[in-house]
Amino acid sequence: MSHALRSLLDLLDLERIEQDIFRGRSRPSLVPRVFGGQVAAQALVAAGRTVPEDRHAHSLHSYFLRPGDPGAPIVYTVDRIRDGRSFTTRRVVAVQHGQPIFHLSASFQTHEEGLDHQAPMPSAPDPETLPAGEELLPRYADVFDGPQVLEWLLEARAAVDLRYVDEPPFATAGTVREPRSQVWFRTNGKLDEYAADPLLHVVLATYVSDMTLLDSILLAHGRGGWGVGDVVGASLDHAMWFHRPFRADEWLLYDQESPSAYGGRGLGQARIYTQDGRLAISVIQEGVVRVPR
């Protein structure tokens, strides 16, 4: 296991300060807000720690209310909305400086047999043939807003091996492309000691899901992205459905597209497949997408 992955796991290991109240911390950040994927992942950890072990997360719906302060702890309060025979529902509010910054509702279910079908996995190259982030990102060091942005991106993504199938938005700024993108991802290290902890794998996928989903919006307009300075963006809401078991330390294909952008907002939707073709997760996110004047 890489040092970066161990640090991420420590970040997601919340401190319990009361029965249904947890405290999390953040990493120092180049931007003055907490990464949205971190808040969503930590909130799901808080919810999951109040649920019986035989119930697994099958969906989450969340809203980003205020930018998080990277320099302050985040307090997560869990409301036990319902404990049914098959389903458990939890609501989590993340608070900083006395104000809510994030709201999440999550549902958990006992295992059941049932109908089974899925959309087929799209074609994609073998992830092992694609450059890893530490190889790809430095190629475009000159397009970022200063060397500190590249250093921050490399550090922020060190725990995850994320590989673009096609050139990312920052590599082709000025060129309008189809609003579709694909990335392969997995943790930068094996999680064998956590094989019996399905919640952790779901939490890690939640963390990664906020990294690239809105990129397809940028491609449709030839914009370079968040580290280039030609677009200002932030997540507004985020929803995920976990369909089938998966491991976050094995390759997952994140197939993303944007059906719409309008009114200063853009929508991204995606499906996440295991390498052997099983549809594991569906994701939808809307974000603020503004062009600086």
Image: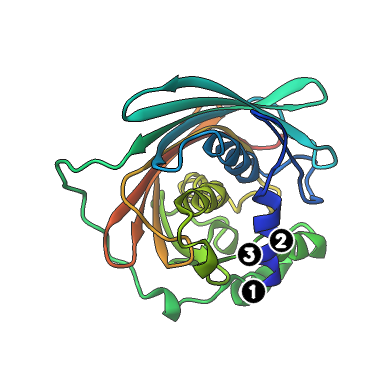
Compared across the picture, whether 95 is left or right of 84 comes to: right
Tag 3 near tag 1, CB within 8 Å: no
* Residue ID at (63%, 37%): 234
* Structural distance between the alpha carbons of marks 3 and 1: 11 Å
Q: Residue 3 or 182: which is nearer the viewer?
A: 3
Q: Secondary structure at mark 3?
A: loop
| Residue 78 drawn at (x, y percent) | 60, 26
Q: Earlier in the sequence, mark 1 or mark 2?
A: 2
| Residue 189 drawn at (x, y percent) | 57, 72
| Among the 4 quarters of the image, the one containing residue 123 | bottom left
Look at the picture and state if 74 lies above or below 186.
Answer: above
Question: Which residue is disc 3 drawn over?
Answer: 159
Under mark 2, the amino acid is: Ser
Look at the image and name its color scheme: rainbow
Question: Which residue is disc 2 drawn over?
Answer: 7
Q: Earlier in the sequence, mark 2 or mark 3?
A: 2
Q: Quadrant of the C terminus?
A: top right
* Residue ID at (80%, 20%): 98
Q: Residue 147 or 134: which is nearer the viewer?
A: 134
Few, some or many residues within 10 Å of mark 1 (<14, 14–19, 20+): some
Tag 2 near tag 3, CB within 8 Å: yes
Question: Which residue is disc 1 drawn over?
Answer: 134
Q: Secondary structure at mark 2?
A: helix
Residue 258 in view (yes/no):
no
